[in-house]
Image: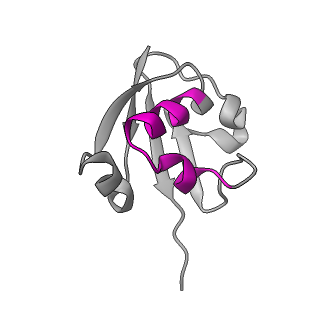
C-alpha cells in the first residue's frame, strides 16, 4: 500500500532532494517508520524523544491535520498523500 509523502524544502536533502517520495504504510506511524528506513533522519526530525509528534511539525493526511484525527494511529489509505508542513513562527 504505497502512499506519497510530500517533503518540505528544509527536509529535502534527507530525501535525496526529492519533493515527494513513495513509501508503504497503513498508519501514519508505519509511514514515518518506513520513511525513516528509506531516508534516515526523518524520525528524529518528526518525533520527539517520547515518540510523539514534535510540536513544530504539522502532518496532514489528505487535507486533515492528524492532531485532530488519531495522531500517529491515523489510517493512511493506499494512494493517499501525507504532507509534512513545518510550523512557521515570527512577527
Tell me: residue 72, above or below residue 85: above
Majority secondary structure in the magenta region: helix
For this view, does 13 lie left or right of residue 28?
A: left
Tell me: residue 67, above or below residue 31: below
Residue 75 in percent (x, y) is at 61, 22
- Please state which of residues 25 and 67 is positioned toward the viewer in this rendering: 25
In magenta stretch: residue 53: no
- Please state which of residues 15 and 4 is positioned toward the viewer in this rendering: 15
- Please state which of residues 16 and 27 is positioned toward the viewer in this rendering: 16
In magenta stretch: residue 44: yes
Residue at position x 72%, y 32% in the image = 70
Instruction: Answer yes or no: is residue 82 visible.
Output: no
Quadrant including the N terminus: top left
For this view, does 38 lie left or right of residue 32?
A: left
Tell me: residue 26, above or below residue 86: above
Q: Which residues are magenta?
A: 30-48
Amino acid at each position: 500500500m504505497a502512499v506519497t509523502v510530500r517533503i518540505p524544502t528544509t527536509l529535502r536533502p534527507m530525501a535525496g532532494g526529492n519533493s515527494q517520495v513513495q513509501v508503504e504504510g497503513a498508519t501514519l506511524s508505519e509511514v514515518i517508520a518506513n520513511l525513516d528506513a528509506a531516508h534516515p533522519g526523518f524520525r528524529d526530525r518528526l518525533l520527539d524523544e517520547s515518540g510523539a509528534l514534535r510540536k513544530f511539525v504539522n502532518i496532514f493526511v489528505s487535507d486533515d491535520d492528524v492532531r485532530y484525527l488519531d495522531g500517529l494511529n491515523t489510517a493512511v489509505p493506499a494512494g493517499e498523500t501525507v504532507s509534512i508542513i513545518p510550523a512557521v513562527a515570527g512577527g
